[in-house]
Structures are given as structure tokens and as C-alpha cells.
Amino acid sequence: MTASDTPPPLPLAGIRVVEIAQNLAGPFAGEILAALGAEVVKVERPEGDDARGWGPPFVGGAAATFQTVNRGKRSVALDLKDERAVAWLKDHLLGCDILVQNLRPGAMEALGLDAESLRARNPRLIYCSLHAFGRAGPKRLAPGYEPIVQAFAGMFSVNGTREGPPSRVGMQVLDLGTGVWAALGCLAALLRRARTGEGCVVDTSLFETALGWMTIHLAAFGVTGRQPPRDRTGSPRLIVFQAFETADGELVVAAANDRLFARLAVELGRADWARDPRFRTNADRIAHRDLLIPEMEAIFRARPTAEWARRLEAIGIPCSPINDLAAVRDDPQTAAIGALAPLPDLPELRTVGLPVSFDGVRPAHRHRAPALGADNAALGAPVPGGARATRP
């Protein structure tokens, strides 16, 4: 595509979304839909989404976290204890396609904004709820944040070193993952609505996302009844699939099948390993891990990371140094795929774009996260307590 070409239309152009959500999971679902072209109106309390204050760092008047998961949206500040605000919201939803919400259990029902009531007025509405532990069960009313659900779902138990304590996964894998599942559920519901003319209810939760990420561990446990050992960089099911210390750092090596292992063995000067009955197959290598890995570690420590990376890449062995954030940001591969880009009206903040492209074009950042209540007047929404809505 050349600079003079018109960008292709985004897939969700013309779709109208209301997001009554705060923190991360629900807003990330809304941000995905916005990046795909939907008009997303974010409904916030008069005080605003808590995530506006989740800093430092702050940029453009809000936390970087908030700016990252609320790009491309409009904002309406509503006091949902005010009957006028609820009435306006119900009327606005008559013309909308999707509602995304993650309020505490029972809150939407108390406001008359439950799925049954809203879909009775607008049968085409897709009503998407994000829960902590799920829509049913003894913990359906329990609040849940990322580390709470990671711990409950067993994720801590498989993360960390063999010698150390169980550890949290360092990214917001449940919040952001649940946002992805919510957006995917909404897209599937739009496809079904195109066939049937009817909307539906979409439910997901942090706990279900966690169980989804744990599916291989749970399947293996169901067969063996054994808790898998923790490994800082490796896998209990594959050898070679881990980091090795080098003369000046660490290199992750993934010789993840017998053919790659044989090739690696030759490069390490131990072609005999590929013929050794203790190491020929992955199952053999797992059984004799304590014999093989120390010998490999000694060999890798003799040469620097860059040399090993160059040699292994030359023979087709997947490998990588353990990068820090500066290295990731500055790597030519990051630049080549155009993953990081500044917000057009907040250039000091570079964020990762939608991790998918259409006809070779990644959807561009549309605009920064909205100021609280920036669109009350434009959308005819009542301003809470008579206060003036803020502008970007």
C-alpha cells in the first residue's frame, strides 16, 4: 500500500458499542473493538475509571495504563444513581450493537440494565459481561483481581524456579486475555446475528481465561496425577527448551524435536548424543535430564551469547537472548512490523497496535484515550451534578 492509497475500511466500521467497564479487562475488550473500527462510548462514574490514576507514569493527564487500553474511544460521565442518566443510557442502547460491562455482580440488575431487560427493548443487542470467577458457582459474587485469580487457578504453582516459591506471571495475562476473549465472543455473536437477526448474551471471566491458559497442565495432571515441576525458563515436557548461561549472558534455545536436537548436538561438538540411547528421543532426554543438561550448560558457558546465537541461527536452531524492554523496543524486527507507534495526539506515548493486520495493513491508532466526560454534550448525555464535562 502506498501513501496515496486509501486505507481499507476497518471490519467493525458502523458498529456501535457501549462500554460500562473499568480497570483493565473490560476496557481492553472495548479498545480491541475500537481498534477494529467500532464507535465505542465509554461510560464512566463522575470520578472516572479508577485506572486513570493507576500511575506513575502519567502522560496526557492520565496514567499510561489508562491511555493504553482506552485509545480510540469516546467518554461519557454518568451518575448511574441518577434516574435521568439511567434513562438516557437505556435510550442510547436502543441504537447500539454491543454492550460490554464488568460492574460488580448484581449492579447492572439493580439499575434495570440487565441483559433480559435491555434485550427486550433491543433484541439485536449483544450483551457481554466480564466476571472474575464466572457467571455461576459459589464464587460468582466474589471480587477478583489478576493476582487473586492467578493464585486460585493454579498459575502460581507452575511458575517460578524449582528451588524457589511459586510466582505470579509478570504480565496482566488474565485481564488482557479476558479482554481478548470478550472481544472474540462479541465478534462471533455479530456473525450469528447476521444469520439470525438476534443478539445474545456473551459471558467470560478471568478464571475461565486462567483455566484456558492452564489447559495443557491440567490435561497432563489428569493423566499422571502429578504436579509439574517449576522451571524458570524451561518446560517439563521438552528438552532442549530452556535458557543456558553463556560467557556473558543467557540464551534461550528451543531444539524442540529430535531432528533439531541432533543438529544442535553436532554444533556443540557432541554428535554422539543423537545416537546415545539415553538422549535419542525427547522422552529419553526427559528421563535423563540430570545427565544431559549439566553437560550442555558447561559447553554454553564457554562462549559469548552473540557467538552462540549466530552459530545456532546459521543451522536453523531457534534461539534468542533474554531481552530487556529497551532491546525489544529498539530491535529492527519490532520496527519492521510496525508494532509500536505513537498516538497521533499524544506523540510522547508509543503503544503497541492491534496485533493483527488486514490486507497487510495494521489498523492505525485513532486517537488518545478520552478525557472524562468529553462527549457528554455531543451525545446529549446529562452531566453529573450539573458539573461541566472535561475536554481533552
Image (tube, grey):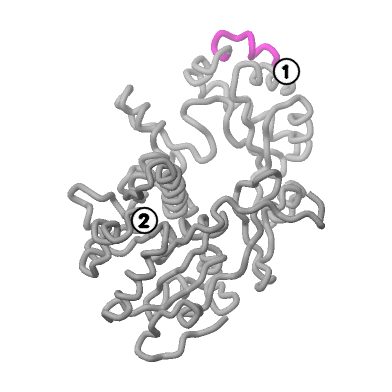
- Based on the picture, tell me whether residue 389 belongs to the magenta stretch: no
Choose between 133 and 377: the one closer to the eye. 377
Q: Amino acid at mark 2?
A: Leu
x, y (%) of residue 48? Answer: 42, 77
Q: Which residue is mark 2?
A: 125
* Residues drawn in magenta: 269-279
Q: Residues within 10 Å of mark 2 (few under 14, many from 20)?
A: many
Residue 162, image x and y in percent?
44, 38
Q: Is there any visible trace of residue 164 in the rendered image?
A: no
Relative horizontal placement of residue 163, taking residue 346 as reference (left or right): left
Whether residues under marks 2 and 1 lie with C-beta atoms below 8 angstroms apart, the answer is no
Is residue 205 positioned above or below 225 on the image? Answer: below
Q: Residue at x 57, y 30 (%)?
A: 241
Q: Position of residue 112 (x, y in %)?
A: 23, 67
Which residue is the site of mark 1?
266
Give the dominant element type of the magenta stretch: helix, strand or loop: loop
Residue 80, picture quadrant: bottom left
